[in-house]
Image: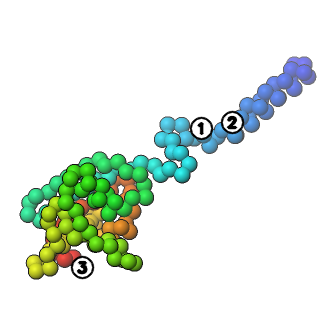
Amino acid sequence: MKTPLKIFIFFISLIIGIFLVQNLDNLTKIGQPQVKVGESPEIIVNLRLDFGNGNIKNYDNIKLREEKTTFDLLKRVTQENNLEFSFKEYPDLGVFIESIDNVANDAKINKWWQYWVNEEYAKVGASNYYLKNGDLVEWKYVEAQF
């Protein structure tokens, strides 16, 4: 093979190599959803409201942006479904749910709105638990767990 042809093939190979190295990160992301800079990816969660009397309402496959809390989810679902909803905010503690769909906390019978995520009783306030893809949030009107 003549020297000019070898040089030509070398430079073409070099150019292809540089292109592949510069685009390697993009090539590994083929088929993955594209997220714009500064934008959180979408997650899908489920919400269940258990009124403690056999009445259970399920809201499935709710699409949210990440960085949403269980409180954000409850607020959105009650607004979208025209359900009464009240809460009180406490500085340094977060929010305390007072009623959902006209069922209010009742100290006389020791029943309160409390939540579970993926069948685990919440260890933090509703405005402090950030949802993850696939989470099942259950708000239950039951005797105090605290």
Q: Nearer the viewer, residue 72 or 63?
A: 72
Which color mode does the image show? rainbow
How far across and how far down the image is residue 20, in percent?
69, 36
Whether residue 50 is visible: no
Quadrant housing residue 98: bottom left
Could you tell which of marks 2 and 1 lies nearer the N-terminus?
A: 2
- State the separation of the CA atoms marked 2 and 3: 58 Å
69 is higher (above) or lower (below) than 14: below
Residue, disc 3: 146
Could you tell which of marks 1 and 3 lies nearer the N-terminus?
A: 1
Q: Residue lying farthest left?
A: 53
Q: Which amino acid does label 2 sit on?
A: Leu
- State the separation of the CA atoms marked 1 and 3: 51 Å
Query: Circle 1: is it few (<14), some (14-19), or many (20+) Cα within 10 Å?
Result: few
Q: Pick the quarter of the image with the N terminus.
A: top right
Contact? badges 2 and 1 (CB < 8 Å): yes
Quadrant housing residue 67: bottom left
- Residue pictured at 14% horizontal, 66% vertical: 103
Query: Circle 3: is it few (<14), some (14-19), or many (20+) Cα within 10 Å?
Result: few
Residue, disc 1: 27
Could you tell which of marks 2 and 3 lies nearer the N-terminus?
A: 2
Q: Is residue 79 left or right of residue 35?
A: left
Residue, disc 2: 20
Whether residue 22 is visible: yes
- Residue pictured at 54% horizontal, 52% vertical: 38
How far across and how far down the image is residue 15, in percent?
77, 31
How far across and how far down the image is residue 41, in percent?
46, 49
Q: Which amino acid does label 3 sit on?
A: Phe
Q: Pick the quarter of the image with the C terminus.
A: bottom left
- State the separation of the CA atoms marked 2 and 1: 9 Å
